[in-house]
Amino acid sequence: MTGNSDATIQGFGLGLRTPHYQDFLTGTVPVDFVEVISENFMIDGGKPRHILDQIRERHPVALHGVSMSVGSADGLDHGYLHRLKALADHLDPLFVSDHLCWTRIEGFNSHDLLPLPYTDEALDIVCANIALAQDVLQRTMLIENPSTYLQFTADSMTEWQFLDAMCDRTGCALLLDVNNIYVGAVNHGFDPIAYLDGVPADRVRQIHLAGHSQGKDRLIDTHDQPVPPSVWALYADACRRIGPVATMIERDDDIPPLAELLAELDIARSLASDDRKAAA
Amino acid sequence: MSLSAMQRDFRGWLIDAPVSMAEWVDADARAGLAVYHNAYRVQLVDCLRDTFEKTLLWLGNDEFIDAARAHIESTPPHGWTLGVYGDGFAHTLAELYPNDPEVAELAWLDCALSRAFEGPDAAPVSPERLVAVDWDNAGLLFTPTMQIAVARTNAGAIWSALSAQDDPPMAAILPEPGAMLVWRQDFTPCFRTVQAIETFALEHIVAGATFGALCLALIERCGEEIGVVEAGALLGQWIGDGLITAISLYGQQPTAQR
């Protein structure tokens, strides 16, 4: 397998969002990489692609998808895969990632990251789909642990056991979303430290940090808040177990001025640095 | 337990089909199911709000949300990109507002401009390319972002007023149906309302007629003097608008500049 995802790339980045385009185009933004939503740029042309090309000249770019649907029982969309490959070949991204979820069945596309049962059958399907994606893309995929709001009665393993087996069977890497672990732990009552201990640390290539909101009965992964103290604490635990990997903050709604996100990124740098000092 | 059976039931549950999720989750999952049920709709409503900004202003928030929900119930999304979800919304609005045809035309315009924004790049023909063209045998290739639709109403004027944050005119039926022409110049989507004669000419060129054949068709329609003048004026307008991306001689395949 080729592609940068096999290399360990460290550093701190941000999700590239429209309100900050001008900052990235005209100034020097102190980030090591930016991450974009793949589908927003899997288009024929126009200004978004032009802007991304300009930013790519200044910063490494990670591609983060939401529509691959590696959990679809009826397989992957080949048209989608080939569009993603064209974009990846053009950008030479740091990573190509998507989520452990399903969005599509029989032509219906929910445009939401829907949960999977953690069963042997689902594992077989997910692994076959990831293998196909990696074969077409000729890159190691990063798969992100999802935020989930329900569990299935058929579950026969934990989410972290599922991720471990998935990495083992496909050779894929992990994008570990610390906020998603926290949201899942609160919603389903599992121990987030057991989760961190259970995932294969040597397969984690990237970490996501984000905020969440309290819904009526569940924590919701809204990406519309600063990273809360509970997630920072879990990130510190993750750093101790995983060591230095590329880390970034996702903010998709109520997007603040860039300076606020950079200040949050400094907190991540500080926590990761503390871990390195402690380990020295 | 079959993953495909679960996913079919989950889809049915999301779109309010008469299915039960009891085979897959226990009662504790009811709150979680509600989160997904709501998120599915919120995402699609947000997509329609983003794409149909002027239609939203024209209808007002409450009516727009009602129309969006009606569309979501009748038209589940199929494409992997949300960018195409709005494609059928104008049709839904035409059914919801049969006596207000400007609503669907506004929606078509919103959608066409949105699609043009991220359509294929194609540079207009350079002025040097226009020198010494054998116009009688010239084939014209329009920009791939060009879209055209019939206009029965003054939706174009309404859209422009809303865009300029001016008071929009009252909706009105045009004395003679025309068309709305949408394309992208550089990175900016744009549109203009065109008369029936230009629609006639555009359709001829799109169907593969050479410019010479178009001249003959316009002469037949308008008479020799007016037909020739119209053909020249339209060609000048199309070049000025950046609509023409390639010119070929009859029998050659036009090659677009990129």
Image: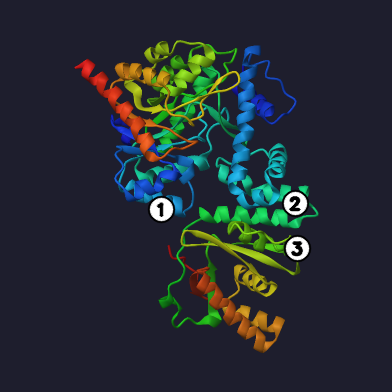
Measured along the vertical axis of the image, is residue A130 above or below residue A188? below
Q: Mark 2 points at which residue?
A: B94
Q: Check the residue under mark 2 and report the chain it is in.
A: B
Q: Residues within 10 Å of mark 3 (few under 14, many from 20)?
A: some
Q: SS class of the residue under badge 2?
A: helix
Can residue A43 be seen at all in this image of the molecule? yes
Q: Which of B209 and A22 lies nearest the eye of the viewer?
A: A22
Q: Where is residue B152 in the image (x, y as percent from the top left)?
A: 74, 63
What label sits on residue B172 in the rendered view?
Answer: 3
Give the camera-side residue of A83 and A32.
A32
Q: What residue type is labelled 3?
A: Ala
Query: Residue at position x 68%, y 75% from top?
Result: B197
Give the alpha-carbon distance from disc 3 to disc 1, as whole Å.
Answer: 39 Å
Q: Residue B91 carries which label?
A: none
Q: Point out residue B109 in the picture as x, y percentages from the top left corner.
A: 63, 57
Where is residue B138 drawn, in percent x and y? 53, 77
Alpha-carbon neighbours of circle 2 within 10 Å: few (<14), some, or many (≥20)? some
In the image, taking residue A7 as reference, residue B84 lies left or right, namely right
The amino acid sitting under disc 2 is Ala
Relative to A126, say whether B225 is above or below.
below
Label 3: chain letter: B
Amino acid bearing label 1 = His
**Numbered-mark total:** 3
Position of the C terminus of chain A, as image quadrant, is top left
State the mark number for residue A50: 1
Q: Where is residue B149 in the image (x, y as percent from the top left)?
A: 67, 61
Per the image, label 3 sits on a secondary structure element best described as: loop
Do labels 3 and 1 touch, CB within 8 Å?
no
For the residues beneath circles 3 and 2, the answer to whether they share a chain is yes
| Mark earlier in primary sequence (3, 2) | 2
* Marks 1 and 2 belong to one chain: no
